[in-house]
Amino acid sequence: MISQTMQQAINAQIQAEMYSSNLYLSMAAYCESIAMRGAAHWMRIQASEETAHALKFFEYVIQRNGRSLVQSVGAPPQEWKALRDMFEQALAHEKQVTGLIYKLYEQALAEKDYATQNLLQWFISEQVEEEANTTEIVAKLQMIGESSNALFWVDKELGKRGASQS
């Protein structure tokens, strides 16, 4: 059985994951508005992954005889200065989510909740991947600057992203 404090913390993480999904969907809409369809595709997949993460936490709480709660999620930003700015904000957001996962892990350690520690190991590995992928995109966008030809190449590469198994 999951403790009440851990249940509350995971429910807060579910809310954070749903915000992440909405954020990436908003970023996809922005990309569509600036004719960056590849980046929009990448962001749609990212939004889908974040929803899957929320559901993974949701199911886990239920498996531990707890109660998952669906809570309101604030509206994400709608506009960015440029594609690079948007991906820089996506990277900052991923780092923030990593911090939230670490706090959950610290709580699981303090409670000696080994099952939750095991679940969170998967999320820690996932966050390493999320940050690495986004860092690489930011580095490429910083390298090319505002060059339109290079932006089209990056957009084409982003459009090749396949759905992951998250």
Image: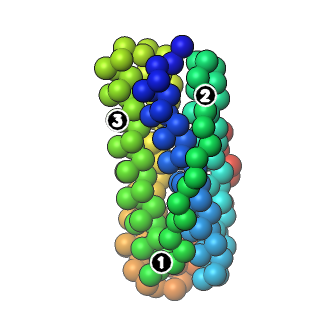
Q: Is residue 22 left or right of residue 133?
A: right
Q: If you read the primary sequence from the N terminus, does the residue marked by circle 1 or circle 2 appear first? A: 2
Q: Is residue 88 above or below residue 130?
A: below
Residue type, numbered disc 2: Arg
Q: Mark 2 points at which residue?
A: 67
Which is nearer the eye, 14 or 126? 14
Q: x and y percent of residue 43 in the render?
A: 60, 61
Q: In this view, does 154 lie to the left or right of 92?
A: right
Whether the residues at callouts 1 and 3 have beta carbons within 8 Å, the answer is: no
Whether the residues at callouts 1 and 2 have beta carbons within 8 Å, the answer is: no
Q: Name the residue under label 1.
A: 80
The kind of secondary structure element at disc 3 is helix
In percent of the image, x 58 and y 18: which residue is there? 64
> Residues under labels 1 and 3: Cα distance?
29 Å
Residue type, numbered disc 3: Lys
Which is nearer the eye, 25 or 77? 77
Q: Is residue 85 above or below residue 163?
A: below
In percent of the image, x 37 and y 51: which residue is there? 95
Q: In this view, does 22 lie to the left or right of 105?
A: right
Q: Residues within 10 Å of mark 3 (few under 14, many from 20)?
A: few
Q: Name the residue under label 3.
A: 103
